[in-house]
């Protein structure tokens, strides 16, 4: 079988290897569709902290069951790529998304940019009623769903989402589904226009918001967000960057604000998102702006950063 390996920053290599053997409790899956994430782009660019090469990227996956004790051959599935230890303090509280020993498939360990993978059954979710495109979008939408769930957002609540990249867009969508009144802070004109046209959400117009959610992962944007929190409000950080952040303590204190981070997602978030997709409450079509052929992965990544390509979400078609 073939696999795309990111051998070092800036380089992908199409390699030939054996189909993985399936151990007991694992299923053999054939990859149908791979969503490309900011994490993959940063890994390729070489600015993903603590990243090790060579690495097979890809964690937003739609796959077809080939061999399994639990699922039927031909069945479409997705996987929850946050491999967890089941024994640490976080796992025993059901917070497998922030397991102390987490291994994210396609980040810490080799992922899905290959023809076949063998995955433990407990990470496989049946995709009944969903298309391969939809299944490849479940993971990034679940990241957004988890952040919104952490904030216990209510109908009518004023929410500011900072950043209109894919995670920001999905966060807006998730908050809107709950009935929140959402505005966006996005300096890039093309991204803002996409958001206005496809989600009907406009630029920030208020002085403050009950809930502010960062989906930029940009230090100065994150720091500026503190001034947007209403008194009694909250700030949820979905985005991540590698520096220390700072804020004015008296400003934070007088608001009695709550600050929280949101990492990955749980199986409950995945199931919630899959149900929203099944009931057509989330359209994936407008978000999938680019589709790459399997043979072109190495070439496409060379210009994936180019803003003139206006990529919102790109997906790779698995090898036929
Ligand atoms: Zn992702
Ligand atoms: Zn754990």
Image (cartoon, rainbow, N blue to C red):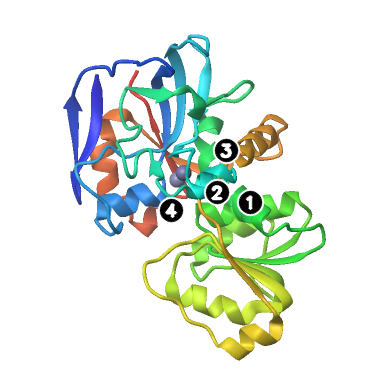
* Measured Cα–Cα span from mark 3 to mark 2: 19 Å
* Measured Cα–Cα span from mark 3 to mark 4: 15 Å
Which of marks 1 and 2 precedes in the sequence? Answer: 2
Mark 3 and mark 4 residues within 8 Å of each other at the beta carbon: no
Secondary structure, mark 4, is: loop
Q: Kindly identify which residue carries mark 4.
A: 310
- Image side of residue 170 versus residue 49, left or right: right
Which of marks 4 and 3 precedes in the sequence? Answer: 3
* Measured Cα–Cα span from mark 4 to mark 2: 22 Å
Above-or-below relation of 115 to 200: above
Q: Kindly identify which residue carries mark 1.
A: 198
The picture quadrant where one finds residue 218 is: bottom left
Mark 2 and mark 1 residues within 8 Å of each other at the beta carbon: no
Q: Kindly identify which residue carries mark 2.
A: 143
Mark 4 and mark 2 residues within 8 Å of each other at the beta carbon: no
Secondary structure, mark 2, is: helix
- Residue 155 position, x and y percent, is 81, 57
Q: Kindly identify which residue carries mark 3.
A: 285
Label 1 CA crowd tier, 10 Å (few <14, some 14–19, many 20+)? few
Question: What residue is drawn where x is 69% and y is 76%?
Answer: 205
């Amino acid at each position: 079988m073939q696999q795309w390996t990111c051998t070092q920053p800036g380089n992908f290599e199409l390699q030939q290897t054996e189909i993985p053997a399936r151990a007991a409790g694992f299923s053999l899956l054939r990859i149908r569709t791979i969503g490309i994430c900011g994490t993959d782009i940063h890994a390729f660019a070489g600015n993903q902290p603590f990243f090790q090469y060579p690495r097979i990227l890809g964690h937003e996956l739609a796959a077809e069951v080939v061999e399994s004790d639990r699922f039927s051959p031909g069945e479409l599935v997705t996987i929850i790529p946050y491999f967890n230890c089941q024994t640490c303090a976080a796992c025993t509280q059901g917070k497998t998304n922030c397991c102390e020993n987490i291994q994210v498939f396609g980040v810490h360990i080799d992922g899905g940019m290959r023809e076949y993978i063998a995955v433990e059954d407990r990470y496989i979710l049946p995709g009944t009623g969903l298309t391969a495109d939809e299944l490849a979008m479940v993971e990034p939408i679940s990241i957004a769903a988890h952040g919104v769930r952490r904030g216990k957002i209510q109908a009518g609540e004023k929410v500011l989402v900072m950043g209109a990249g894919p995670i920001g867009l999905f966060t807006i969508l998730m908050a809107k589904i709950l009935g929140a009144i959402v505005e966006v802070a996005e300096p890039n004109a093309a991204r803002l226009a996409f958001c206005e046209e496809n989600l009907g959400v406009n630029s920030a117009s208020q002085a403050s918001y009950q809930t502010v959610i960062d989906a930029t992962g940009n230090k100065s944007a994150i720091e500026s967000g503190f001034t947007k929190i209403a008194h009694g409000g909250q700030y949820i950080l979905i985005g991540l960057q590698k520096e220390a952040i700072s804020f004015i303590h008296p400003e934070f204190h007088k608001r009695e604000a709550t600050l929280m981070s949101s990492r990955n997602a749980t199986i409950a978030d995945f199931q919630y998102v899959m149900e929203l997709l099944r009931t057509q409450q989330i359209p994936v079509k407008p978000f999938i702006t680019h589709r790459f052929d399997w043979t072109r992965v190495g070439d496409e990544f060379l210009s994936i950063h180019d803003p003139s390509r206006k990529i919102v979400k790109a997906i790779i078609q698995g090898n036929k």
